[in-house]
Image: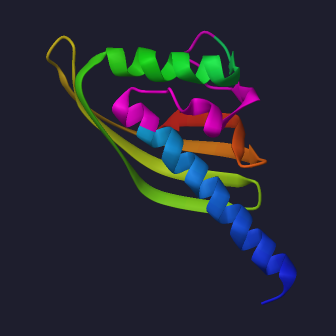
Amino acid sequence: MCSADIISTMDNKRATAVMEAMVAMFASGDPSEASASVDEAYLDHQGLGAGPLHGVDGFAFVVRANFASYRHLEVRIEDLFASGDRVAARITWVGRRSNGEHTTRKTIDILRVSGGRAIEHWGAAV
């Protein structure tokens, strides 16, 4: 293994750790540690349907808004892939909405990571 492979492996591990931390915040509804994984320059291209959101506060807003619409929520990563500064996950969201409706949704989420924190996000339902 050459030094470039070691650096790439370390970058991949950091990127996957960032995705795992962000998904855990969605599962718990608690973004209090978001600044450890999300950069102030973060740009969420998906947002909440009203355009992109920015920074740690934008991420925290999405986490709280999403969690508030559920009585119970489980979020799990089904697949996780990293290459360079990108990490992609296939995520399953299972929960009971505040209105009692049971829901399951699946998403594909992609992060760009720099300096050990997310700086860009793209997401789509599948």
- The image quadrant where one finds the N terminus is bottom right
Q: Position of residue 77 (x, y in %)?
A: 41, 51
Residue 126 in view in this figure: no
Q: Is residue 32 magenta?
A: yes
Q: Over which residues does the magenta segment extend? A: 25-50
Query: In the shown orientation, is residue 78 left or right of residue 58?
Result: left
- How many badges with numbers are in the image? 0
Please identify the residue farthest to the left as the structure is shown: 100
Q: Position of residue 18 (x, y in %)?
A: 59, 48
Color style of the picture: rainbow
Q: Residue at x 85, y 81 (%)?
A: 3
Indicate whether 82 appears above or below 95. Answer: below
Q: Residue at x 73, y 45 (%)?
A: 112
Give 54 or 105, whichever is nearer the viewer.
Answer: 54
Q: Position of residue 10 (x, y in %)?
A: 71, 68
- The image quadrant where one finds the C terminus is top left
Query: In the shown orientation, is residue 26 left or right of residue 83?
Result: left
Indicate whether 116 appears above or below 83. Answer: above
Quadrant in which residue 15 is drawn: bottom right
Q: Residue at x 51, y 20 (%)?
A: 62
Quadrant in which residue 68 is drawn: top left
Q: Is residue 83 magenta?
A: no
Q: Residue at x 63, y 38 (%)?
A: 36
Q: Position of residue 33 (x, y in %)?
A: 54, 32
Quadrant in which residue 95 is drawn: top left
Residue 39 in view in this figure: yes
